[in-house]
Amino acid sequence: MDELQQRQLDFLEDTVKYYSEDTSRRAVKFSGGCFYRTDDGRKCAIGRHIPDELYNESIENKVIYSIIEFGCISDELRELGMLFLSYVQELHDSNVYWVSGEGLSIEGGKRVDYIKRRIIEGNYLS
């Protein structure tokens, strides 16, 4: 496993740990999707890693691939790969992967295992 794959695994594990400790931290919309940041301070899986000085309100409602043009993503985050980041974001966004107040659902655990397998197989290498 190379350095990038280890960083991807670490990012995924940190994301799962953060939202599993308190599922109310998820910045999801009732209608589906998420906010990078909410008015009450919650942040999505990617939004957590956008520094205050790079955050731009106009990225809300934009997919991860399109927010690069706004200059909100650090080089370190971008290096993880947009495909990988989109899979982690989808894990955050989907209510089927989380049980309120408990953490990952059974489906969520399977999804995390799937993402980990793809990391190890090198599917997210840029």
Image (spheres, rainbow, N blue to C red):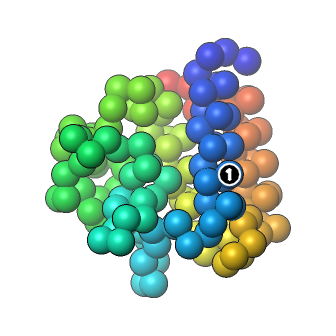
- Residue 123 in view here: no
Residue to which mark 1 is pinned? 17
| Residue 47 falls left or right of residue 126 | left
Amino acid on which the number 1 mark rests in the picture: Lys
| Residue 121 rendering spot, x and y as whole percentages | 73, 29
| Residue 116 rendering spot, x and y as whole percentages | 73, 40
Q: Secondary structure at mark 1?
A: helix
**Residue under the point 35% across and 72% down:** 40
| Residue 94 falls left or right of residue 21 | left
User: Image quadrant for the N terminus?
Assistant: top right
| Residue 10 rendering spot, x and y as whole percentages | 65, 34
| Residue 97 falls left or right of residue 34 | right
**Residue under the point 49% across and 53% down:** 45
- Residue 48 in view here: yes
Q: In the figure, 110 relative to 10: above or below?
A: below
**Residue under the point 45% across and 59% down:** 44
**Residue under the point 66% across and 52% down:** 16
Q: Nearer the viewer, residue 104 or 115?
A: 104
Q: In the figure, 36 relative to 28: above or below?
A: above
Q: Nearer the viewer, residue 118 or 27?
A: 27
